[in-house]
């Protein structure tokens, strides 16, 4: 049973560029959340997608956007990259109706902005 | 009100010892408190979680103690092993409603062989 799959695992981008990160949820899960984890810090909630809609958003600027596809996979897009966007981006999937129980995290995408 | 404060930042324990990590929260609406374990290069993995209607939950060598009146909860790792060396995060959320987890800043645990 595959867990949460994220791609790519590592990425280097230049300031001002745009990046797209991808996530495939755990089999049977229908909800995807994205978190940003800066070095030495705890993960920070970016947003959550359910039924292809953004259900809730954290304190992140509009440069961060997302999408969920009919197969429940998701993308995180970041425009106009800043040096401060360098972080580990984590995708977590869960099953709606299970409340906040059963979050499964992927191994993340390490984004470096130079 | 949305913060979860975690301490200590780092912890060194001898093999066989007890590791204790503490967290405090402010928002009394939180009703779900998980602990996550994260190894380098990996995503966080759920270790154990508690709801505030119980004061303690034990799973193997891992125990959560919960003090609702003090708005504090802690993770105890009994008989700590070198394989437990990882970063541990506490988190808090509302099981219904806002959906998001508020994470602590993490504790880097090193268990000496």
Image (cartoon, coloured by chain):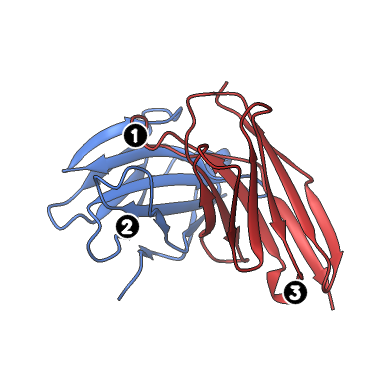
Q: Do labels 1 and 2 share a chain?
A: no
| Residue A31 in the image: above or below residue B42 | above
Q: Label 1: which residue?
A: B96
Look at 37% across and 64% down and name the residue there.
Answer: A7
Chain letter tied to red: B
> Residue beneath label 3, please?
B81
For the residues carrying marks 1 and 2, which lies nearer the camera in this image?
Answer: 1
Residue A56 sits above or below residue A107 on the image: above
- At 61% from the left edge and 31% from the top edge, which residue is drawn? B68
| Chain containing mark 1 | B
Chain (blue)? A
Find residue B99 and report its horizontal and vertical position in percent.
Answer: 37, 36
**Sequence-wise first label, 1 or 3:** 3
Question: Which of these two is toward me, B69 or A88?
Answer: B69
* In the displayed structure image, the side of residue A110 where residue A40 appears, left or right: right
Q: Name the residue: 78% across, 59% down.
A: B19
Residue B14 visible to the viewer: yes
- Residue annotated with mark 2: A22
Please tell me how crowded label 2 is: few (under 14), some (14-19), or many (20+) other residues with Cα within 10 Å.
many
* Whole-number angstrom distance, CA of label 2 to CA of label 3: 35 Å
Q: In this view, does A74 lie above or below A80?
A: below
x then y, percent, for residue A17: 41, 44
Q: In the displayed structure, does residue A5 sit left or right of residue B101?
A: left
Q: Nearer the viewer, residue A58 or B109?
A: B109
In the orientation shown, which residue stands out farthest toward the top? B1
Identify the residue at horizontal 47%, vertical 34% (top origin).
B31
């Amino acid at each position: 049973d595959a867990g949460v799959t994220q791609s790519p695992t590592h990425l280097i981008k230049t300031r001002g560029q745009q990046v797209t990160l991808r996530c495939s949820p755990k089999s049977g899960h229908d909800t995807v959340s994205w978190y940003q984890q800066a070095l030495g810090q705890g993960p920070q909630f970016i947003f959550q997608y359910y039924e292809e809609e953004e259900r809730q958003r954290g304190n992140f600027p509009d440069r961060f956007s997302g999408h969920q596809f009919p197969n429940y996979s998701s993308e995180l897009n970041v425009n106009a990259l800043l040096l401060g966007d360098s972080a580990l981006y984590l995708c977590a999937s869960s099953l709606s109706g299970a409340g906040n129980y059963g979050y499964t995290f992927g191994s993340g995408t390490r984004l470096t902005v130079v | 009100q949305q913060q979860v404060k975690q301490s200590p930042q780092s912890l060194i324990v001898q093999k066989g010892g007890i590791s204790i990590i503490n967290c405090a929260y402010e928002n009394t609406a939180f009703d779900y408190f998980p602990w996550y374990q994260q190894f380098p290069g990996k995503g966080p993995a759920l270790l154990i979680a508690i709801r505030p209607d119980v004061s303690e939950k034990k799973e193997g060598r891992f125990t959560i103690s919960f003090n609702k009146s003090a708005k504090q909860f802690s993770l105890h790792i009994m008989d700590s092993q070198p394989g437990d060396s990882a970063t541990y995060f506490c988190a808090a959320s509302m099981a219904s409603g806002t959906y998001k987890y508020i994470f602590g800043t993490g504790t880097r645990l090193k268990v000496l062989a």
